Image: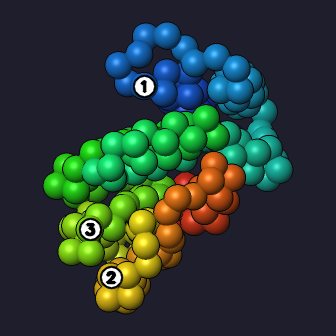
């Protein structure tokens, strides 16, 4: 049962994040996110009034909190495509067009899933994968590649990648991939 002021403050924070997913935005997001915000604020109001919520409501609440994804790809068309698809599927997506910058982002923020392009057969995406695993050996990282390159595949999997997939992925395939591997906020870090 959830019944405390700390939980109420946390719910208020997530409602705010859902309403304004872009930190630079002053406009609330419309549609699905607004109904999630209303649900979160309703649960917060119940807690503030001294009521508790049961496990079913708590699980529903966790499903409302947007998952944070990092997508790193130097192919700008692929980056734009995957980022747009995932944003439309309700994820908070940080799109990074360089491996060096992607590795830096991994070092300063937490993500529920990191999707990184292999790059050329030289496997430039290795820097992002290595940084993620260095920071958290359980970091959920998926490598995407234009073609299966067996040495890169072996290196990625031995380094700690969860999967190695061949591009292009359809919108439904990328959605399935993310749902399969996205880390739950209640999971261990």
Tell me if label 1 and label 2 are in contact, CB under 8 Å. Answer: no
Q: CA distance from mark 3 to mark 2?
A: 10 Å
- Mark toward the viewer: 3 or 2: 3
* Res 152 → quadrant: bottom left
The spot of residue 185 in percent (x, y) is 55, 55
Q: Earlier in the sequence, mark 1 or mark 2?
A: 1
Nearer to me, 108 or 100: 100
Nearer to me, 158 or 165: 165
The kind of secondary structure element at disc 3 is loop
The spot of residue 155 in percent (x, y) is 31, 86
Q: In the rendered image, which residue does mark 3 sit on?
A: 120
Residue 183 shown left or right of residue 115 in the figure? right
* Res 26 → quadrant: top left
The crowd level at tag 2 (other Cα within 10 Å; few <14, some 14-19, many 20+) is: many
The crowd level at tag 1 (other Cα within 10 Å; few <14, some 14-19, many 20+) is: some
User: Residue at image x 29%, y 64%?
Assistant: 119
* Res 7 → quadrant: top right
Nearer to me, 141 or 122: 122
The kind of secondary structure element at disc 2 is helix
Q: In the rendered image, which residue does mark 2 sit on?
A: 152
- Mark toward the viewer: 1 or 2: 2
Can residue 2 be seen here?
no
Residue 75 shown left or right of residue 44 in the figure? left
Q: Residue furthest top?
A: 27
Q: In the rendered image, which residue does mark 1 sit on?
A: 22
User: Residue at image x 42%, y 48%?
Assistant: 78
Q: CA distance from mark 3 to mark 1?
A: 31 Å
The crowd level at tag 3 (other Cα within 10 Å; few <14, some 14-19, many 20+) is: few
Please, is residue 178 above or below residue 137 in the view? Answer: above
């Amino acid at each position: 049962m959830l019944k405390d002021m700390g939980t109420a403050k946390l719910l208020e924070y997530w409602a705010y994040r859902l309403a304004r997913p872009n930190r630079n935005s002053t406009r609330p997001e419309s549609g699905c996110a607004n109904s999630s915000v209303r649900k979160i604020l309703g649960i917060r109001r119940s807690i503030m009034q001294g009521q508790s919520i049961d496990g079913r409501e708590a699980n529903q609440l966790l499903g409302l909190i947007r998952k944070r994804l990092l997508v790193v790809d130097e192919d700008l068309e692929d980056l734009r495509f995957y980022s747009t698809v995932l944003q439309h599927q309700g994820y908070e997506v940080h799109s990074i067009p360089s491996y060096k910058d992607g590795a830096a982002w991994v070092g300063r923020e937490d993500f529920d899933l990191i999707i990184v392009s292999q790059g050329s057969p030289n496997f430039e995406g290795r820097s992002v994968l290595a940084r993620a695993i260095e920071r958290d050996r359980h970091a959920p990282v998926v490598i995407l590649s234009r073609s299966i390159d067996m040495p890169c595949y072996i290196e990625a999997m031995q380094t700690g990648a969860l999967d190695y997939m061949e591009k292009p992925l359809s919108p439904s395939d990328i959605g399935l991939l993310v749902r399969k591997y996205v880390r739950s906020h209640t999971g261990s870090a």
